[in-house]
Image (tube, grey):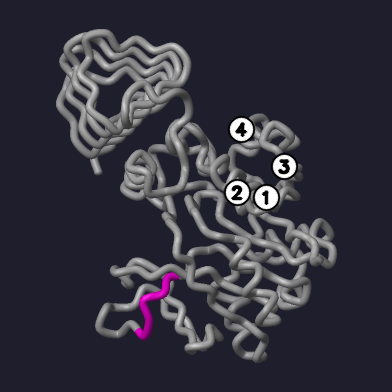
Amino acid sequence: MAASPKAMILAAGGGTRLYPLTFTIAKPMVPVLNRPVMEHIVALLRRHGITDIIANLHHRAEQIVSYFGDGSRFGVSFDYSREHQLLGTAGGVKNVAGFFGDATFLVIGGDDLADFDLAAMLAVHRERGAVATIAVSQVEEVSQYGIVVADDDGRIRSFQEKPKPEEALSDLANTGVYLFEREALDFIPPGEFFDFGKQVFPLLLERGAPFFAWLAAGYWKDIGGPREFLDANLDALDGKAGICAPGEELSPGVWREGETQANGATIEAPVALGEGCQLESGCRVRRAVIGPGARIPSGARLDGCVVGEGVEVPPIAARDAIFTPGRVVWV
């Protein structure tokens, strides 16, 4: 029986597209249902028997190390690679080639929320004798994604970067979830900034390597900006993302973690309440994630919102908004 793959989580980016959410926290630490998105990635890997994980770090590295530690709290084993100079998606992977040894390995972005059957992906990857496999997802708005063009048998033929709908040759988006064999590392020079999409994948095509797409049926969201961040949280609340809100379910669709104060507040499911949050009498909260220690005053009316940890919301009506310390982000 073949060994389980190892995994690398790409966690070194600065998260500039997520400003102002990432002014004070690392991109993989932005919360989905009051847990860092990277924690959901780790849970996905563990569910599919992938427990040897490494993450590359750069921006606010200590936040990630402090939270995940050696991984034992999450049922995995964690290693870290600190990049004093960013090496790119592929360069960062090449930098830890020794961690992978001769094992098949998976690469996933630290800001991806996914519910893929990784075991099925691995089985197809090995059945095809692939050197590299990209998980792809069917999308409607092709102009927002890197598009993968593949034959009926899944072999990749070309790529299109955010094509116009009338020019798109496919509706399969590159999700940034990859499986590789050890040979793929030979396409990446050591010690250089190198990118999978711009450099490695064209090389694989040019040299005729066994390079395939695998159509993933599950949920996927690249949390690239505030809109995607809000959508990911609301999708998770709605049960679309394959994750559950932490804590106990007080009533259908209303979850509470630890002690909260909500007497007299109107709460309309689905809602996730973080530990120690306070909802004053007279406030109304609908389809929202309320962070730990947050306070919602009596005059507030929230619909489709995420409130960050410890944030005191002003007494306003808000729809499709993110509340961070000192800021309201309208999306």
What's the distance in space between the residues labelled 4 and 2, CA to CA?
Answer: 11 Å
User: On the image, numbered disc 4 is attached to which residue?
Assistant: 63
For label 1, count other residues whose C-alpha is less than 10 Å away and answer few (under 14), some (14-19) or many (20+): many
Name the N-terminal-most of marks 4 and 1.
1
Crowding around mark 3 (Cα neighbors within 10 Å: few <14, some 14 to 19, many 20+) is some
- Contact between marks 1 and 3 (CB within 8 A): the answer is no
Say if mark 4 contacts mark 2, CB within 8 Å.
no
Reading the chain from its start, which is encountered first: label 2 or label 3?
A: 2
What's the CA distance linking mark 1 and mark 3? 16 Å
Q: Earlier in the sequence, mark 1 or mark 2?
A: 2
Query: Where is residue 315 shown, x and y percent of the image?
Result: 18, 18
Q: Which mark is residue 11?
A: 2
Query: Which amino acid type corresponds to the residue marked 3 in the rendered image?
Result: Val
Q: Nearer the viewer, residue 162 or 302?
A: 302
What's the CA distance linking mark 3 and mark 4?
18 Å
The reply to whether residue 201 is visible in this rendering is yes
Disc 1 designates what residue? 56
Q: Which mark is residue 33?
A: none
Q: Position of residue 138 (x, y in %)?
A: 38, 70
Q: CA distance from mark 4 to mark 1?
A: 13 Å
Tag shown at residue 76: 3
Left or right of 110, for residue 193 = right
Q: Residue at x 27, y 78 (%)?
A: 165
Q: Nearer the viewer, mark 1 or mark 3?
A: 3
Which amino acid type corresponds to the residue marked 2 in the rendered image?
A: Ala
Identify the secondary structure beneath mark 1: strand
Q: What span is in magenta?
A: 169-173
Query: How would you rate the neighbour count of disc 4 (Cα within 10 Å): few for under 14, some for 14-19, many for 20 or more?
Result: some
Q: What is the quadrant of residue 239 in the picture?
A: top left
> Do the numbered discs 2 and 3 sit on residues whose CB atoms are within 8 Å?
no
* For marks 1 and 3 on the same chain, the one whose residue lies earlier in the sequence: 1
Main SS, magenta residues: loop
